Image: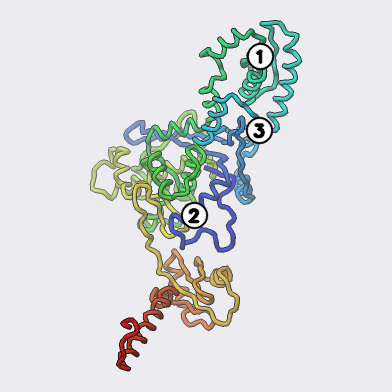
Amino acid sequence: MEFTGLHSVFPQGKQPSLFDSPAEWYLKARRSVQKFTVNQLGLSIFSNEESNKYVAHSYNFFLFPTTFGVMDSEFSFQASSIQFLTHYGFDYNKFLKDGIPYTNEVQEKKLQQGLLTGNWKVRSTLDKDKVKKVIDDVTRWVPSAEEGGSMVLHDISGFQIFEVQLILRQALPDVWTEPFGDQKVMVKKVSPRHRWCLENSSCDCCRKELVLLSARGFTNLFQTLVEAKKPIVGHNMLMDLLHLHDKFYKPLPESYEEFKRNIHSLFPVLIDTKNVTKSIWKEFQFPRASNLLEVYEILCSDLNPTNPTCPVIAHASDCLKYADKKSPHEAAYDAFLCGSVLLKVAHLLLGRMPCDTLETGPSFSQYLNALTKYLNQVNLIRAGVSTINFSGTDVPSQRPPLLIASVRGWPGVDEEQIYQKLKALCKFDVRRLTENQFLLLSNKFKDFRVVLRDYRDHPNLQISLYRYWRHSPQANCLLQICGIVASWSLLAFVIGGSPWYAM
């Protein structure tokens, strides 16, 4: 997916960090998802047509929230995201003018309620102006028109086709409407009995189910994906899953665990190629790759020992756009790269397993078997765990131990200043512990060793391993209380009197 923005601007000290539990990270990400929207979704469907050949059908969908009736979504743009996508040729005009509508279940219920009550309203200023002109034209025509007479309304497009008809039928009991060619609506003057017959006809183009089908737009395809129960593959796909839930299913719940249950129910098999490649990359001694395209190119090269026997991946005859052209950060191209990386990595992993199917061509079920430990494990960039397990309990990360920085001669120092001080040498997330003590956390053992070496005896910023019973304010408070009680008890014993608590 591509979005109008990625991360909200958080107040100082409230950004996502390695100190966050998965639930804390989720609440921060939820805020960003509620603020931005999806502007492009790419889908690449891989079909295993021969024993060792897969054919990919890749599609781009420009999306735009449904503006229909009372539905009028709000969303933000992030300047850096616009700059980034514009650099890669993203067509914002197509997104804004021709984006496919979509709804989630809550929005659909509101729309349904409006259709049931018959109290149809228009929120869009553009549509209001169009509807006002149409009503004026029709109300001037109706009094002098004969029964059976008709007039044609021109330049009516998109959801206006439905809105104009619903509003005219609601306002004028002696007219009937129906689409007439391209961007036109025909209005007829009819008798009350004829009107009643038309309203109860199965041929009415404004039947509730047809209106809802049109308003649901891309959500219809989302529902097809849910019903198919096929493995869903993405690269660093957590934000995609958050938006899928929020935009096409239901608004994101406050509960992190409920979000996990919902996603697992919608998509029982998830595979994050970022998580898989991150896990095996060093093991196979591949050069460092900073993005999905580089990962794909390395796996397609001679550096991949199993590349000659990998499945053949071809573009479908009606989807040849990417056959000879690289289009990074175009959603469908990235989706194609994702599926290709999955097949090549699965083939690589299967080669380590005791089997004799590599030459004849493994089945996809064998590939899934080779990926078992990675199923439903989705990469999490900055939090207390490195992956979210959508089918069980999240496993704590194996990260360097917690460090403590003790400050001397630096009045008023805060987390940002500590971060900037260390930034040139290494990167740590910083959280204040006391007035002059800060906790440091990194996901790189190299940075952990470097900062311990260079700052262990620093005159102003001493860094050492954090020990709970030594450094925690709560532990120190408890130890002080225990010390006071023990001192009073000892004093009472020495002077020979009864302990105070026995009096």
Foreground residue among 218 and 164: 164
Whichever of callouts 2 and 1 sits on the residue coming sooner in the sequence is 1
Vertical relation: 297 (above or below) 99: below
Identify the residue under disc 2. Answer: 290
Q: Amino acid at mark 2?
A: Ser
Q: CA distance from mark 1 to mark 3?
A: 24 Å
Whichever of callouts 2 and 3 sits on the residue coming sooner in the sequence is 3
- Of helix, strand and loop, which one carries label 3? loop
Foreground residue among 320 and 44: 44
For the image, the number of numbered tags is 3
Whichever of callouts 1 and 3 sits on the residue coming sooner in the sequence is 3
Asked if marks 2 and 3 touch (Cβ < 8 Å), the reply is: no
User: Residue 112 location, x and y as percent?
Assistant: 53, 28
Q: Amino acid at mark 1?
A: Met
Identify the residue under disc 1. Answer: 186
Q: Nearer the viewer, mark 1 or mark 3?
A: 3
